[in-house]
Amino acid sequence: MAKITFDGIEVEVPDGTTILNAARKIGGGVVPPAMCYYTPLKGSGGKCRACLVRVAAGSAKDPRPMPKLVASCITPVQDGMVVENTTSPQVLDVRKGIVEMLLINHPLDCPVCDQAGECDLQNFAFEHGVSTTRYEEERRTFEKIDIGPYVQLHMTRCILCYRCVYTADQLTDGRVHGVLGRGDASEIGTYIENIIDNDFSGNVIDVCPVGALTDKTWRFKQRVWFTKPMNAHRECSHEKCNGHVTLWYKGKDVLRVTARKDEYGEVKEWICNECRFDKKETADWIIEGPAHVDRSSVVSQGHYELPVINPQVIADLPESTVRDLQQNPPLKLGGFNG
Amino acid sequence: MGRKLLTEHVNVEGIETFEVYRKHGGYRAVEKALKTMTPEEVVDEVKKSGLRGRGGAGFPTGMKWSFLAKPEGVPRYLVCNADESEPGTFKDRYLMSKLPHLLIEGMIAGSYALGARTSYIYIRGELLYVLRILEKAIAEAYAAGFLGENILGSGYSLDLYVHPGAGAYICGEETALLESLEGKRGNPRNKPPFPAVQGLYARPTVVNNVESIASVVPILNDGGDEYAKLGVGKSTGTKLFSACGHLNKPGIYELELGLPVEEFIYSDEYCGGIWKGRELKAVVAGGSSVPILPKELILKTAAGENRLMTYESLSDGGFVTGTMLGSGGFIAMDETTCIVKNTWNFSRFYHHESCGQCSPCREGTGWLEKVLHRLEHGHGSMHDIDLVVSVAKQIEGNTICPLGEAAAWPVAAAVRHFRDEFEWHVKHPKEATQPGAVYRGAGVLV
Ligand SMILES: Cc1cc2nc3c(=O)[nH]c(=O)nc-3n(C[C@H](O)[C@H](O)[C@H](O)COP(=O)(O)O)c2cc1C
Ligand code: SF4
Ligand code: SF4
Ligand code: FES
């Protein structure tokens, strides 16, 4: 185990844990943003530089500060390490710069982008950036490409996080897309527009932090904040999929199906294309209840979900009330009214 | 002229062949190492020599070798970085094409020292003719029993391969090189793990520059202590410099480290002064990535001392008034050179060569190029001058590999030392865009 101090808060984590995951253990506002790192994807991270932090002391053994800011998503903790994120003006300043860099070639077409409302780049820019740009040049643009019957690639919006590449590498047996070209001319491409035809290809949509890879069966159907996410499952025949999904409802209609994500937007369990694209009837599913949506998200504006009670508060409640809550948890109190 | 350790026989007829090379003392170092020394003793000699990496960073080679992890039963590799693509640097190709056996000999000695049984020379794709020269020489070395099984009956075996890249500057960065050598896209890796622990095929690996490896040969022949007697302070031995630009005698010079820069530029023994009787304006002393210095600061340090061709002296004054020895690509610019144009030109190179993995470099290099293009072509504003400095600062230190710095430093240094020239471009766009027009201080136009 290693004990580190992160933004003045002590936390103990197993050796080998990354700084980012140590911060996630603390949770809340001190957690550095991550635009490329994705826990389920081996090898991801280190690229976007959104998560840079300052290591004020390397370890108890060698308490010297690290000369450069480090990517918290790939840097393992050392016992006695002291890390500064929100407490370092340098980090906050550099992060503003990263937002600026990620946006200079971004089309900022949120009003017509399907990802708006659940876009990591929107959130990142809103929380860490400045509202003006110093970029006057023409932005990089690409043609939209259909890759297969379900997925559309709008490369103009891509931030080259490589998540979809790792997903295809690690989930499907034979990746047919990847990064072509170099520098700011790099693009995600399916060489000679090969079609991604694979039972798990739809997962690239879920991992994409922006609106570069979108679900063609859902495009332009609805703004995400007008929909209600419900967790549901089904008996899936695919051996690698256990059918745990989130259904996105508008009224009685299932507009899309996605994998379930945690509070950091990371997929908990990959789902197959059959669950994602072919099962769009409520009758296909056993409904579990509303999916938890972070209250800071615009998706929560539907107010269908009561706040989850803090466990510490629960500990102080009378036993009978706790039992009551357990039988009827607040998560399920929300009004799913079909 | 000072002593030459690497290029002494470079002009001997047929020196690229095994036979002639051998006649001139070639492969003595390998014989000595394999027959009379343990691998540790070879590493010790290199340590004693004080040799510093010739690929740009100047890291002590002996120390690098001693850091190599040596887990039981796991292969290790020596990889020679022959990707040489930094603008202004063209010493390795010269060495390899003229003296292929020198590199091969260094590779054998180095591989023996590190316990590598398979070694690679990763060569820049455009240098196809050099690859052919090397392959021919390697075949000769195999035939003569210096490569392959049981070399010279010592029980030590080594296979040596040459592998061409596809012509990407970034593949000179050692971890991108390893990715490329493994057959993948040449993206630099995140570090740690460092190559010494997980390099080629995730095995412990040392990556060294061509010249570093070649220097092992004279070090073993003469002994590390003898080698360390050459040079000044921590800059020991001799080093190749590729001199180019507005010089009377551009070319490749092997110098004992410590020669005054002024002598290197003006002496007839070396570059013979600035061409066409013109004045020197600025020098980029160590390849396009290092900060540019104006004449006054390249000849003398801020403290007024003679600047020497050593790691320490060139970096005296830090980046405020100094630069770096880098890879030894010495670019001299005369008074008719437009610094704004040159800075734009360099930034165009880095924009083109960024691998695009990390956002500050991918987006920042393009941005720099565009704003510098604007400044050079008379559409810039005063604000743009501060903008390029600010963008460079946003890249520097925040990227996966040092290409970010390599792109940022030249821009920051150009504005630091030649700000008035940038401002002149903004204030006098008409004059500045006339063909051949150059600012010469105090508003004087050529
Ligand atoms: C963008 C970039 C390009 C590089 N290109 C070369 C190169 O062409 N040749 C080289 O020897 N080193 C190059 N280097 C330095 C290598 O990463 C590495 O430090 C060097 O090969 C180590 O060898 P040395 O210790 O013998 O100098 C480059 C570094 C960077 C960041
Ligand atoms: S398409 Fe999306 S997931 Fe793939 S690299 Fe681009 S931003 Fe990342
Ligand atoms: S700094 Fe530039 S070249 Fe290096 S890894 Fe990042 S994007 Fe690639
Ligand atoms: S999340 Fe760490 S670099 Fe992208």
Image (cartoon, coloured by chain):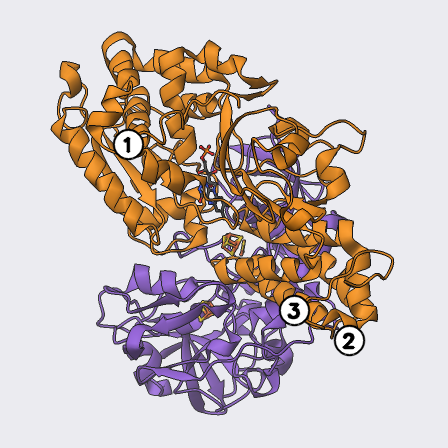
Count neighbours of disc 3 (C-alpha within 10 A) and say few if under 14, some if 14 to 19, many if 20 or more: many
| Mark 2 → mark 1, Cα distance in angstroms | 55 Å
Mark 1, residue position: B13
Residue B335 is left or right of residue B178, and the answer is: right
Residue type highlighted by circle 2: Lys
Foreground of the two, A292 or B140: B140
Report x, y in % for residue A303: 63, 79
Would you say the residues marked 2 and 1 are in contact, meaning their CB atoms lie under 8 Å apart?
A: no
Measured as percent of width and height from the top left, residue A274 is found at: 28, 78
Q: Secondary structure at mark 2?
A: helix
* Residue type, mark 1 in image: Glu
The tag earlier along the polypeptide, 1 or 3, is: 1
Q: Are marks 3 and 2 in contact (CB under 8 Å)?
A: no
Instruction: Quickly name the residue at label 2.
Output: B430
The quarter of the picture where residue B65 lies is top left
Report the front residue among A83 and B69: B69
Q: Could you tell me which secondary element the residue under label 3 belongs to?
A: helix
Chain name for mark 2: B
Chain corresponding to purple in the figure: A
Chain identifier, orange in the render: B
Q: Residue at x 51, y 14 (%)?
A: B228
Q: Which residue is mark 3?
A: B373
Q: CA gap, disc 3 to disc 2?
A: 15 Å
Residue in the image at 41% along x and 56% along y: A40
The answer to whether any part of residue A63 appears in the image is no
Which is nearer the eye, B164 or A112? B164
Residue lying at 75% horizontally and 73% vertically, measured from the top left: A132
Q: Mark 2 or mark 3, which is nearer the start of the sequence?
A: 3
